[in-house]
Image (cartoon, helix red, strand yellow):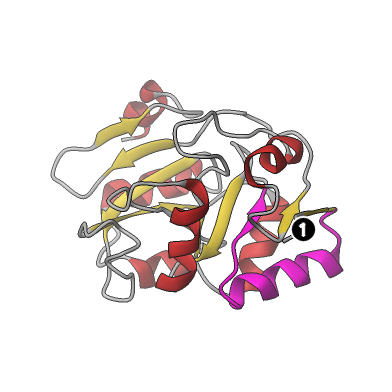
Amino acid sequence: METKILKPTKENLQRAGEMIRAGEPVAFPTETVYGLGADGLNVAACKKIFAVKGRPADKPLSLHVANLETVEKLVKKISPAAEKLFKKFCPGPLTIILEKSEIVPDFVTGGKKNVGIRFPDNEIALALIKISGCPVAAPSANISGMSPPKNAEEVLKNFSGKIPVILDGGKCKFGISSTVVDLSGDVPKILRAGAITEDEIKNCL
């Protein structure tokens, strides 16, 4: 397989979206780092993410969305705390964990009852998600255990010959992963520090 780096033209975004609908993984930029995306409701497609990355099977995937209406379909309930964070920081570098709805496959969440939701602040990512017509599972586009890539060339070093397309959006704005906040329990927990600080989360809540 030849891995192609493509500029995010309308035609190439359409092509990449068609690949995701067909169950293929595609790398694309976000404001944090580059992600390796696939149809987040298609187990066979998500298995390709795990295979390409060498990702442990019990490590869940978060789902990227292009609007908040989609979130309502993916989770059982959007809590008041989640509403505050979505309103304040989304689109943005934040992943919010809530109890998943039945349409989210257990495989995608590593057998867990919760799912991480991310609404990226990147025009290319949002366009790709909309064209794909599905929530896009997209961990960072690196081999598991290695540093997340900040540009298309770094993605190519990781996945040359393993994925069909990398959408080149230049260098990522933040260069560090999203902040992960678990709101599935009674007390909010920050599971991963990232582009949004703990103080910003606390002040919002």
For the residue pair 189 and 47, the one nearer the viewer reads as 47
Residue 20 locus on image (x, y percent):
61, 70
Please provide the residue range marked out in magenta.
Answer: 7-28
Asked whether residue 19 appears in the rendered view, the answer is: yes
Identified at 55% across, 48% down, the residue is: 91
Crowd tier of the residue under label 1, counting other residues whose Cα lies within 10 Å: few below 14, some 14–19, many 20 or above: few
For the residue pair 21 and 97, the one nearer the viewer reads as 21
> Seen in the image, is 83 located left or right of residue 128?
left
Identified at 25% across, 67% down, the residue is: 76
Residue 167 locus on image (x, y percent):
75, 53
Quadrant assignment, res 204: top left
Quadrant that contains the C terminus? top left
For the residue pair 42 and 135, the one nearer the viewer reads as 42
Residue 190 locus on image (x, y percent):
30, 32
Asked whether residue 68 appears in the rendered view, the answer is: no
> Seen in the image, is 191 located left or right of residue 161?
left
What type is the residue that disc 1 sits on?
Glu
Identified at 69% across, 75% down, the residue is: 18
Residue where numbered disc 1 is placed: 2
Residue 15 locus on image (x, y percent):
77, 71
